[in-house]
Structures are given as C-alpha cells and as structure tokens.
Image (cartoon, helix red, strand yellow):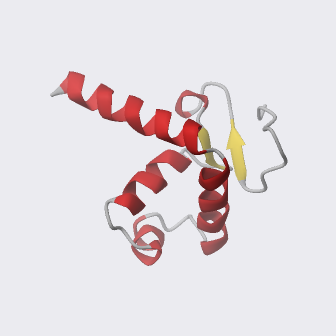
C-alpha cells in the first residue's frame, strides 16, 4: 500500500518497506534523492534516462518538482546515504 504524501504527487510514491520508505518513482525502487544526487554530480537527464531505461522524462520532471518542494527530506536522505557509505568504507 502506498503511503499518502503531503499532496498528490503524480508518479512519486512512498511505500513502507521499499527503499526505507523514501520517495521513489512510482512502481520502481528508484529514490528521488538518488536522482537528485546524480544530478548534483553532473549527470544529465539524458544520461539518467539511458542508465534507467524504465524512467521517462515525465518521471524525472516529477522527481525534480518533488525534490524542490521537499528539500529537507531530500537533503536528509542524501546525508544518511553518504553516512552509511562512510561506515562501510
């Protein structure tokens, strides 16, 4: 069952038990924070679409809008992921 978001975010879902409940592209395990992080590293939208062939340009547009309206949530998820990588290394 998809968790209800603050607003109706078409194409973005939070599902308990999937990717830690993070906001993902609906129907996938691709978290919005990961796409934002790739973008910050200089990955273009076309590169993301090539790397994730199940995504559409609309999916990316939805992710960017979601990230823009939920910056604290996205920043926290990126930071937590970075910290977990540091623990592994």
Residue drawn at x 46%, y 63% as measured from the top left: 52
Name the spot of residue 54 as percent of width and height, x first.
Answer: 55, 64
Name the spot of residue 5 as percent of width and height, x first.
Answer: 78, 38
Residue drawn at x 55%, y 44% as measured from the top left: 29
Quarter of the rendering containing residue 46: bottom left
79 up-or-down from 60: above or below:
above
Quick one: 52 or 75, which is closer to the camera? 75
Kindly tell me whether residue 36 is visible in this rendering: yes
- Left or right? Give the position of 11 relative to 73: right
Q: In which quarter of the image is the N terminus?
A: top right
Q: Quadrant of the C terminus?
A: top left
Kindly tell me whether residue 30 is visible in this rendering: no
Name the spot of residue 58 as percent of width and height, x first.
Answer: 67, 70
42 up-or-down from 12: above or below:
below
Residue drawn at x 48%, y 40% as measured from the top left: 75
- Left or right? Give the position of 35 relative to 81: right
Quarter of the rendering containing residue 80: top left
74 up-or-down from 20: above or below:
below
Residue drawn at x 84%, y 48% as measured from the top left: 8
């Amino acid at each position: 069952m998809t968790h209800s978001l603050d607003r109706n975010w078409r194409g973005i879902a939070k599902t308990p038990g999937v990717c830690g409940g993070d906001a993902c592209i609906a129907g996938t395990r691709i978290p919005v924070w990961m796409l934002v992080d790739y973008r910050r590293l200089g990955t273009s939208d076309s590169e993301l679409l090539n790397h994730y062939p199940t995504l559409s340009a609309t999916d990316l547009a939805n992710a960017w809008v979601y990230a823009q309206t939920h910056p604290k949530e996205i920043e926290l998820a990126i930071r937590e992921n970075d910290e977990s990588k540091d623990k592994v290394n």
